[in-house]
Amino acid sequence: MVAAPAPPESSLPNPPKVKDIAQPTLADSVAPPTTEVPTIQGLQSTRSYARSDRWQLLLATALQNAAVALGIGFVLVAGQKLYMSQRLLGIGEAVKSLGGGFIAGLFGGALGQLLYQYSPESPISKRSPASLAGPSSAQYSAAA
């Protein structure tokens, strides 16, 4: 009987054993992408608001400051009258002090919040006030 020929030697390395393969860890897994909503912060708040709500935040801050200034203006005029031993506030003087305080507070609150939104520390500061007006005519002509 003739003996079978010997098999040729393989030049391939032995396959790895199961214990040699590194198991993936939780940190190696792919996390789903996150969508970050651009936010802004109020001048007198620690809460963040969506960037699209900046005008509502501006109005709310202006009205809050107007209410405070309205009260302060009224108390200042009434205190001045009392200190100078004059008669109490009349209707006209009361309306003037309340209106003046309201307008000053509205303007001051709106201006303060607007400046805060565009300060270097604010998240919205990456956009200039001019960019809020919309695209310029140069941008329209470049797009055409």
Image: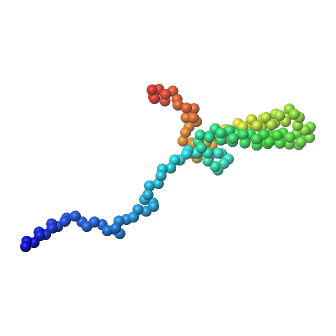
Is 112 rendered above or below residue 26?
A: above
Q: Which of 31 and 66 is in front in this view?
A: 31
Q: Image point 15% across, 67% down: which residue?
A: 7
Task: Locate the N terminus by quadrant.
Answer: bottom left
Give the x, y percent position of residue 114.
63, 39
- Give the residue at the far front of this rendering: 1
Is 31 rendered above or below residue 71?
A: below
Q: Which of 136 and 31 is in front in this view?
A: 31
How many circles with numbers are drawn on the protein?
A: 0
Give the x, y percent position of residue 31.
47, 54
Q: Nearer the viewer, residue 55 or 118?
A: 55
Give the x, y percent position of residue 139.
49, 30
Q: Which of 55 and 36 is in front in this view?
A: 36
Q: Image point 44% across, 55% down: which residue?
A: 30
Q: Image point 65% across, 45% down: which residue?
A: 43
Left or right: residue 82 compared with residue 109: right
Q: Image point 43% across, 62% down: which residue?
A: 25
Quadrant hosting residue 93: top right
- Whether residue 118 can be seen here: no
Left or right: residue 108 compared with residue 143: right
Quadrant hosting residue 18: bottom left
- Whether residue 57 can be seen here: yes
Task: Locate the C terminus by quadrant.
Answer: top left
- Give the residue at the far left of this rendering: 1
Quadrant hosting residue 72: top right
Is 127 rendered above or below residue 23?
A: above
Give the x, y percent position of residue 109.
69, 40
> According to the image, what is the colour scheme of the structure?
rainbow
